[in-house]
Amino acid sequence: MDIRILSILCGLFLLFLSYIVWYQNKKHPANISLAIFAASSALWCVALYFYENPIIYNPRLWIVLVYVFVFIMVGSTLSFSFVFPNERAKVALIPIVIYSLISLPFIYVLIFTNYWIKDVIVTGDSSITITGFLYPYWGGFNALIGTWIVNNFIKKFKISGPLIRLQLTYIFLGIGIMAIGTLGGDVIIPVFF
């Protein structure tokens, strides 16, 4: 199957998943943060599709949007790590404010300079992003936030009962798969090889 079609199908599935999670409990902060994660992942998939298949606008705009959606995904995951399974939204407020304040300069650099994305080259049937010198710092920032997220879940794993531990096991599995693919494929390999 063409990766572009798979991207759109995943986006549609994630949008549906976002609605289901939110609809289950519209007021619980864990459901809200997980629904935001799924919705931003869906939009990430759509932006990735248009990056690879720039029917409208240019690939640079779409890759910028891909990274903007990553900021939302990471922020919602950080929030989720604080409010899952039964915490109030207040618990995540200060960490989200800290994350947002540190993210703002990165987003500015992403949108308004070529220090993050130097260029996008369109070849026959795909686009290639040439990253700038600040790109590795963004990867390091995400690694630190990812460590914070995992640390929150480890603390909860140690004090939780069997059902929550089972749920956290699946969360660890998902984070592990995602971290290998994103940090490995999008940061470590491009920066060091």
Image (tube, rainbow, N blue to C red):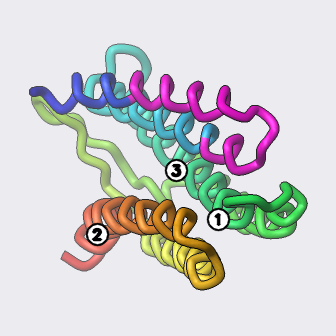
The three-letter amino acid code for the residue at tag 3 is Val
On residue 178, the disc is: none
In the displayed structure image, the side of residue 97 where residue 2 appears, left or right: left
Residue at 62%, 75% (x, y): give it: 160
Residue at 78%, 69% (x, y): give it: 95
Residue 13: x %, y % from top left: 40, 26
Q: Residues within 10 Å of mark 2 (few under 14, many from 20)?
A: some
Is residue 23 one of those drawn in magenta?
yes
Q: Earlier in the sequence, mark 1 or mark 3?
A: 3
Give the magenta-colored segment's residue range.
11-34
Question: Would you name the residue on which mark 2 appears?
Answer: 184
Majority SS type along the magenta span: helix
The three-letter amino acid code for the residue at tag 1 is Ser
Alpha-carbon span between mark 3 and mark 2: 15 Å
Q: Nearer the viewer, residue 130 or 142?
A: 142
Question: Would you name the residue on which mark 1 appears?
Answer: 81
Q: Nearer the viewer, residue 87 or 41?
A: 87
Residue 165: x %, y % from top left: 51, 70
Q: Quadrant of residue 173?
A: bottom left
Q: Disc 2 or disc 1, which is closer to the eye?
A: 1
Question: Would you name the residue on which mark 3 appears?
Answer: 70
Q: Nearer the viewer, residue 171 or 47?
A: 171
Q: Residues within 10 Å of mark 1 (few under 14, many from 20)?
A: many
Is residue 154 one of those drawn in magenta?
no
Alpha-carbon span between mark 2 and mark 1: 22 Å
